[in-house]
Image (cartoon, helix red, strand yellow):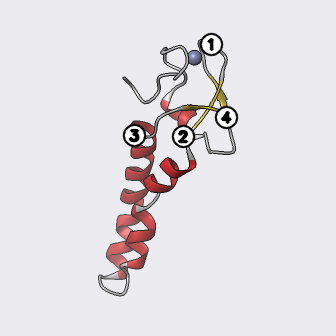
Amino acid sequence: MSKLTCPSCNHQAMSNWEKLLLAPIASHKCESCKLELTVPFIGIALCMLPTPILVFMIPWINAALVMGLIPVSVCLSLFLVVNSVPLIVAK
Ligand SMILES: [Zn+2]
């Protein structure tokens, strides 16, 4: 089951880009059943962890290396949001 699948109708609910614009306070209508969908806060928070972890490592590794790796960690976070966080029905 894709992480873009609607939990209600089991059809694709939105595109990858539309899912990236979701936040726990924002919702998006399923393309099939028009139910309001969102993502759980804890899922987004866990996916965003790589960047702060990298910043906290500055005292131990080269700061220039950290700056170079931040775009990589941001891309990793966006990839994780799209591919690992399930959609839930907004309340
Ligand atoms: Zn649906």
Ligand 1 is located in which of the four quadrants? top right
Q: Residues within 10 Å of mark 4 (few under 14, many from 20)?
A: many
Cβ atoms at labels 3 and 4 below 8 Å apart: no
The reply, left or right, for residue 26 in relation to residue 65 is right
Q: Where is residue 4 in the image (x, y as percent from the top left)?
A: 47, 27
Which one is earlier in the sequence, the residue at label 3 or at label 4? 4
Q: Give the distance between the C-alpha atoms of the residues marked 3 and 2, in whole angstroms.
A: 12 Å
Q: Residue at x 61, y 20 (%)?
A: 30
Q: Give the distance between the C-alpha atoms of the residues marked 2 and 4, in whole angstroms.
A: 11 Å
Which one is earlier in the sequence, the residue at label 3 or at label 2? 2
Q: Name the residue under label 3.
A: 84
Name the front one of labels 2 and 1.
1
Secondary element type, mark 3? helix
Q: Cβ of disc 1 within 8 Å of ligand 1?
A: yes
Cβ atoms at labels 3 and 2 below 8 Å apart: no
Q: Which amino acid does label 4 sit on?
A: Ser
Q: How crowded is mark 2: few (under 14 residues within 10 Å), some or many (20 or more)?
A: some
Q: Where is residue 12 in the image (x, y as percent from the top left)?
A: 49, 18
